[in-house]
Amino acid sequence: MITIYLDTSLEQLRVYLLKDGKILSKKERKCKNEHSIYTVNYIKDVLDESNLQPNDVDTIMVVNGPGSFTGLRIGISIAKTYGYILKKDVILISSLRQMAISIKNQIAISLIDAKNDNYYMGIYDMFDNEVKVEKFAKKEEVIEKIEKYKDALLISNKNFKIDNYEVNKVELDIEKIVDYYKNETPTNVHKILPNYLKLPQALEDKND
Amino acid sequence: MEDVICLAIETSCDETSMSLVKNGTEDLATVVFSQIDIHKTFGGVVPEIASRSHIESITYVLEELFNKTAITLEDVDIIGVTYGPGLIGSLLIGVQVAKTISLITNKPLIPVHHIAGHIYANNIENRLKFPLIALVVSGGHTDLVYMDKDYSFKKIGSTLDDAVGEAYDKVAKILGLSYPGGPKIDDLSIKGEDSYKLPYPLDDDSYNFSFSGLKSAVLNTVHKEHQKRKEIKVEDMCCSFQNRVVEILTKKTMKAVEEYNVKNLIIAGGVSANNGLRHKFSILCKEKKIRLSIPKTKYCTDNATMIGAAAYYAYKNNIIADLSLNAKATDNLYDMEILQPND
């Protein structure tokens, strides 16, 4: 069982190749706007390193958001095309949930900075496997949730403070994430879209 | 020589298009998914909405393309894609799709400049004849180009401010015409008279153009008429504006044809669908015995067929990208910035 794991949602671009849940090869780098340059190249690199052909892959797991709109579309357009042409399963991973999966705590509040005191927020009870919230939220609402879930671990893709609360960077555990999602039902490739959690500005302005 | 089939992808603005093109001239199958109805309600293309729409439709377009023909992906020899210029978020999607297909199929990836595509729209069904002058008129470009062979583009002049298509859209907005305004001005101008005194824009000896002054003149006239509490005769304004534009475009282009001593003229880009422009050029070229080529209307607006046509000649000229190909919002097509008549 060969899996490609793709994460283009945030600054850290990650392309992993796994066999039966164990990492075979990986390529990562910090990107500002260069996801477009490196992602397909990295897929080729990880396949080459393991002497595999594109068609040897069984499943593509791709992070579909939330995150940078452009970044998400890069990963998704690659996964859709790959899955469509070679008739491979595509499984979608939440950028917020994968952080919660990577830690041991029962309750986690995952945050991704969405600029101007806004956050993408996910609240998970990993013990009961329950998603309590996954949304775009203003700072006040995030703080309200932090105060409500006092036992929750506050995690993100980087270290920062939100008022007096420390939010800690999580090192993603890719094997754990892939294992967690392995029995997920694949999505029809035509229907795969980024999970933006936010409307385009032009539409928000229109709705005002 | 062996046939070369190109799978071409174009997502530079608000059309998701894919095409199969044989030997740079034969349109085997083309799909164009236009987002125009989505953007209409905003009065113009909204980049983020365009990008979201592209990603929704890419695999549907790919499926429909291969459903139209017996050709399979194995029959394809090269993958051509518009890498720029255009809306970066939109371009990026086409580029990723093309790179992924190139990785999977191990077929050469050909980067195509959008304007080269517009020029090569004239090569579909009819081979270009050289040397030629090309007038490129679109929402982003107004360029005069000299070509003495395939895939060699020498710029001899261009707009100093607004592109002609941009001027059409802005004037349409001033006149309260809905998006896209260019074709509406073209239609209305037939019903009107050239009754407004608008200036000839940059009527000099150069091969450059300027349309922002003409646009301002329209705006000023509209304001003045409003102050006098007079209604603007929209048809007349369309006619006067279009006449000035067509006049200056044809004048400078025909001058270039003469000075560069060519017998072939091609018109390219979205504005080449303009009936007023097509009509005037066909009269002038008949008079001067110049071979005129204007793409069929369906190849004037953005489409992947023209990208497949250009990709073939790019490939013949060894323009091949690797998997690091990136999209570029702006990029220069020309070998030489300005070519003088006796260079």
Image: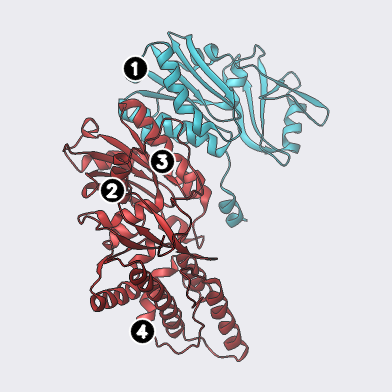
Badge 1: few (under 14), some or many (20 or more) residues near its Cα, within 10 Å? Answer: few
Measure the alpha-carbon separation of dots 2 and 3.
Answer: 17 Å
Q: Are marks 4 and 3 on the same chain?
A: yes
Q: Is residue A131 visible?
A: no
Q: Are marks 4 and 2 on the same chain?
A: yes
Residue on which disc 2 sits: B309
Q: Which residue is at a point 33% across and 72% down the rendered structure image?
A: B258
Q: Are marks 2 and 3 on the same chain?
A: yes
Residue on which disc 4 sits: B191
Q: Amino acid at mark 4?
A: Lys
* A65 shown above or below B37: above
Give the colour chain B carries in the figure: red
Q: Are marks 1 and 3 on the same chain?
A: no
Badge 3: few (under 14), some or many (20 or more) residues near its Cα, within 10 Å? Answer: many
The secondary element bearing badge 1 is classed as: loop
Picture coordinates of residue A7, whole percent (x, y): 53, 25
Picture coordinates of residue B166, whole percent (x, y): 49, 65
For disc 1, the chain is A
For disc 3, the chain is B
Residue on which disc 1 sits: A53
Measure the alpha-carbon separation of dots 4 and 2.
Answer: 37 Å
Q: Amino acid at mark 2?
A: Ala
Q: Amino acid at mark 3?
A: Gly
